[in-house]
Amino acid sequence: MKTLLLTDNEVKDLLQISEVITSVENAFREKGLNRIQMPAKIYLNFNKEQGDLRSMPAFLDKLEISAVKIVNVHPNNPSRYKIPTVMATIILIDPKTGFPLSIMGGTTITNMRTGAAGAIAVKYLAKENCKRIGFIGAGIQARTQLLAILSLIDTIEGIKVWSRTKESILAFINEAKKKYGKKYRFFSAQSIKEATSEVDLIITTTPSVIPLVKKSMLSPGVHINCIGADASGKQELDPKILTNAKIVVDDWNQAAHSGEINVPLHSGLIDSSNVYGELGEIVAGLKPGRTNNSEITVFVSTGLAIQDAVTAQLAFEKAKGKKIGELVNFVI
C-alpha cells in the first residue's frame, strides 16, 4: 500500500470552491445529526514568537472519512519571514485500517473550507437579495470569503473594504477587479464605520483582541461572519452586538474557548442562553435559520476538523482520478 503525497500547489489546482462548499455543507449536516467524532482543538502556544500550533482530528462515521490536521497561526510571518500567517498539513486516514491514504499541504484547504463555511452561513442566515458587503480585514481569508460568497449569492452589487493600511485595501481591490471584472463595484473605506454602514453582510477577518465593529454601526437585518477570532482572547465585535443578535456557532465548545463569543462569555457579558445554536443544526433542518429581515445574525467561525477532513477527501479523490501527486511507501 502506498501513500499519496500532494503539495499545496497541487491541491490548489484540484479544488473548485463550489465543490468545497458542497462538501463542507455535508460535513455540517453530519455534525448536526451527531454522526461525527471531533475532539476540541489542541493548542500549543509559542508565546515568544506570538504564534500557535493546533492539532485537529475528525471522523465522519457515515461518510467514512477521517483526517488529522496540524496548522499554525503566526501573524508576524508575512512581515518577518515572507511566508503565510497560516500553514497546514493534513493526513487523510483510512478508517478501516488506520493507513495514511494521503499526506497533503493543508493551507489552501484551510483557506477554502473556511470561506465555504462563511458562504454556507450566509446561505442560511443572511436575508434575501443581499446587495452590499463590508469587509473588515483584507487578507487571504477576506479574499476566500468573497470568492465563496459570490459563488452562491448572485445579487451582490457593491463591496466595501477596510483594513489597517491603504496598501492592503488597494491590493485587495485591485486583485478583485482583475478576478471579477466590472460586475461589482469596489470601494475603499476610510473607516470601520464607513465599511459597515448600510451593508447587508459584514465579514471580519482580523486577528484583533479589541472590538472593532460597534453596535451603532449596524443596519437592521445585517448578517455578520466572524472569522478572525479563532483563539482565546481574540474578539472583533462589540459585545453589545452579541446580546441582541441571533448567534450561530460552528461548534459550541470551540466557540466558547476561542471564537468571537469567548471574551464576553468569560467576562459574564453573555452566557449560553445567548447562543441560538450550531450551524450544523440549521443545515440539518433541526432549527430554522433567519426568520425575518430585521434580525441581526452572527456566525461565529472557529474552523472545524470535519471541514478539513471532507475537503481533503475531495482533493484525494480528484487527485487519484487525474493521477496527480506522488505515491510513496511511507509506512509499509
Image (spheres, rainbow, N blue to C red):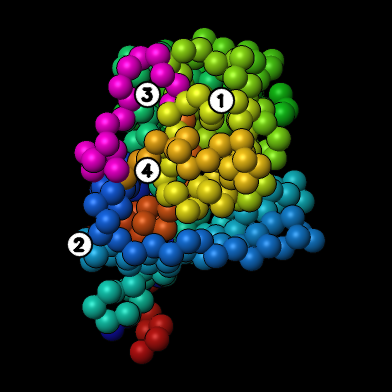
Q: Earlier in the sequence, mark 3 or mark 4?
A: 3
Along the viewing direction, whichever of 45 and 2 lies nearer the viewer: 45
Secondary structure under tag 2 reads loop
Which is more toward the observer, 94 or 256? Answer: 256
Range drawn in magenta: 281-297
Q: Quadrant of the N terminus?
A: bottom left
How would you rate the neighbour count of disc 1 (Cα within 10 Å): few for under 14, some for 14-19, many for 20 or more?
some
Relative placement, left or right, of 40 versus 94 is right
Mark 2, other Cα within 10 Å: few <14 / some 14–19 / many ≥20: few
Instruction: Report the mark closest to the observer, 3 or 4.
Output: 4
Mark 2 and mark 3: Cα distance apart in space: 30 Å
Give the Cα distance between marks 2 and 1. Answer: 38 Å
Q: Which callout, 1 or 4, points at the residue further toward the start of the chain?
A: 1
- Residue 320 in the image, given as x and y percentages of width and height: 26, 64
Q: Of marks 4 and 2, which one's residue comes earlier in the chain?
A: 2
| Label 3 crowd bin: few (<14), some (14–19), many (20+), radius 10 Å | many
- Residue at figure coordinates x 73%, y 49% from the top left: 76
Asked whether the residues under the numbered discs 3 and 4 touch, taking CB atoms below 8 Å apart as contact, a structural biologist would say: no
Residue 209's spot in the image, x, y percent? 70, 40
Of labels 3 and 1, earlier in sequence is 3
